Amino acid sequence: MRIHVVSDVHGRAEALKTAADGADALFCLGDLILFLDYSDHGRGIFAELFGQENADHLIDLRTRKRFEEARAFTRRMWDSLEGGAWPHIERAVRRQYAELFAAMPTPAYLTYGNVDLPQMWGDYLREGHHVLDGEVVELGGLTFGFVGGGLRTEYRTPYELDDDVYAAKVAAVGAVDVLCCHIPPSVPDLLYDTVARRFERGSDALLEAIHETQPRYVLFGHVHQPLARRVRIGRTECVNVGHFRGSGVPYVLSL
C-alpha cells in the first residue's frame, strides 16, 4: 500500500491536485489556509486585506516575540475594516477553502491544523473526503489514528487546544500502526525551526503514547524547517512529512 502524505498546504491548491498521483490514498495533516506568509510577506489573507507593508510589520513583531505589540497592532488593523474583522476573514477563508477542497484528491483522509477553521470544512468536503480527529481508520489491514489541531501558544491561532483536551484525543486513538497528527511529539530536535529560529510547541501526550504503544510511524508537520526531519524512539519512526507549500511534493509512505 502506497500513501502520500501532505501537511502545511497553506494555499498551494495547484500542487495539491496531483499530490495523490500513484498513491492508494492521500493523507492531509492540516493547515490548509494561508493567513500570513513568512516567506513571501505579500501573500496571505492579512496582506490581501492590509498590504505587504503592514504584513512586514506584523511578522517583524512576531519574530522578535513582541506579542502584546503584535496583538495591539492587529486589533487596530481589524478595527479599521468596515463591519469588523470577521466578515472579511470569513470571505477570504471561504475563498481559499473552496479552491483547496476542489483540488483535494480522493480518497483523502484529513485532520485539522492549528490555523484551520473546522466549523467551515463541512461546506466544502466532497465524496471521498474523510475527516478524522481523535479517530481511527483501517486501511489495508493496518490502523491509522488521526489527531488534529495544535496546543495553546502566543500566536493564538484558530484551532489551538488546552493540553488536556488534546491529550484526550490522543488517548481516544489508542494503539495504532500509524499515528498521524498536525504537531510533533515534544522532542526538541523535531520542534526547532531553523529558519524562524524558534521552538514550536509539541505534545507531551503524543510522546507518552509513543513510549507506551510504539506505533510503526508517527507522521506530522507544523514545523516548516525542522532541525531534524526524522527521529527514532524505540521502534517508532517519527517523521516530519514536510512543508507542502514550500516543496509541492508529498511524503511517500509505503507499507
Image (spheres, grey):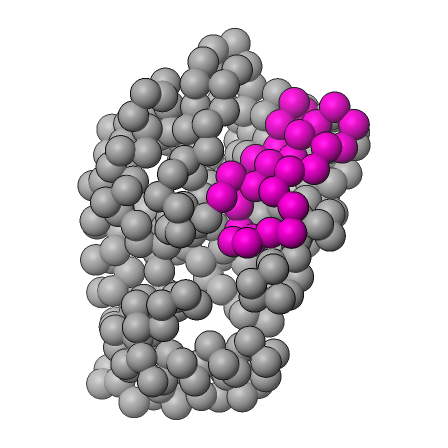
User: How many labels were placed on the picture?
Assistant: 0
Q: Residue at x 66, y 30 (%)?
A: 237
- Quadrant hosting residue 91: bottom left
Q: Nearer the viewer, residue 147 or 57?
A: 57
Q: Residue at x 40, y 51 (%)?
A: 246
Q: Measured from the top left, where is residue 141 in percent x and y?
A: 52, 9
- Say whether residue 140 is visible: yes
- Say whether residue 173 is visible: no
Whether residue 118 is situated above or below residue 35 in the rendered picture: above
Q: Nearer the viewer, residue 210 or 60?
A: 60
Q: Residue at x 26, y 33 (%)?
A: 18
- Quadrant hosting residue 217: top right
Q: Measured from the top left, where is residue 68 in percent x and y?
A: 57, 85
In the image, residue 141 lies in the stretch drawn in magenta: no
Whether residue 10 is situated above or below residue 155 in the rendered picture: above
Q: Nearer the viewer, residue 115 or 43?
A: 43
Q: Measured from the top left, where is residue 112 in percent x and y?
A: 45, 46
Q: Residue furthest top?
A: 141
Read off the magenta span: 215-242
Left of 107 or right of it: where is 198?
right
